Image (cartoon, rainbow, N blue to C red):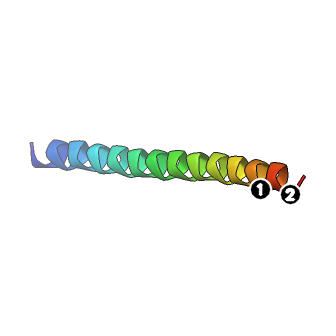
Amino acid sequence: FFKRGNKIQGLFLTFCEHSFIAIDFLFIFDYTLIVDDFENVVNTYKN
């Protein structure tokens, strides 16, 4: 039972790590989109 519990705990931890990585990736992706929009706005004001 204890070994099985450790296995489940390990799977849960890896799942959490993958979720955090996915969340970080989404934030980075959103950030790049925001930066692109900002650059577009700056360029339109320059022109």
Closest to the observer, 14 or 19: 19
Closest to the observer, 23 or 33: 33
Q: In which quadrant of the rendered image does the N terminus lie?
A: top left
Instruction: Give the residue at x 83% y 53%.
Output: 43
Mark 2 falls on what kind of element?
helix
- Give residue 3's position: percent from left, percent from top: 17, 48
Mark 1 falls on what kind of element?
helix
Q: For mark 2, what is the residue? A: 46
How many other residues sit within 10 Å of disc 2, few (<14), some (14-19) or many (≥20)? few
- Give residue 41's position: percent from left, percent from top: 74, 49
Apparent side of residue 38 relative to residue 4 in the rendered image (left or right): right
Looking at the image, the residue that sits furthest to the right is 47
Apparent side of residue 22 relative to residue 40 in the rendered image (left or right): left
Instruction: Give the residue at x 86% y 57%.
Output: 46
Closest to the observer, 28 or 18: 28
**Picture mark count:** 2
Looking at the image, the residue that sits furthest to the left is 1
Q: Are marks 2 and 1 in contact (CB under 8 Å)?
A: yes
Closest to the observer, 14 or 43: 43
| Disc 2 residue type (three-letter) | Lys
Instruction: Give the residue at x 66% y 51%.
Output: 32
Q: For mark 1, what is the residue? A: 42
- Give residue 11's position: percent from left, percent from top: 31, 44
Instruction: Give the residue at x 22% y 48%.
Output: 9
Apparent side of residue 6 relative to residue 1 in the rendered image (left or right): right
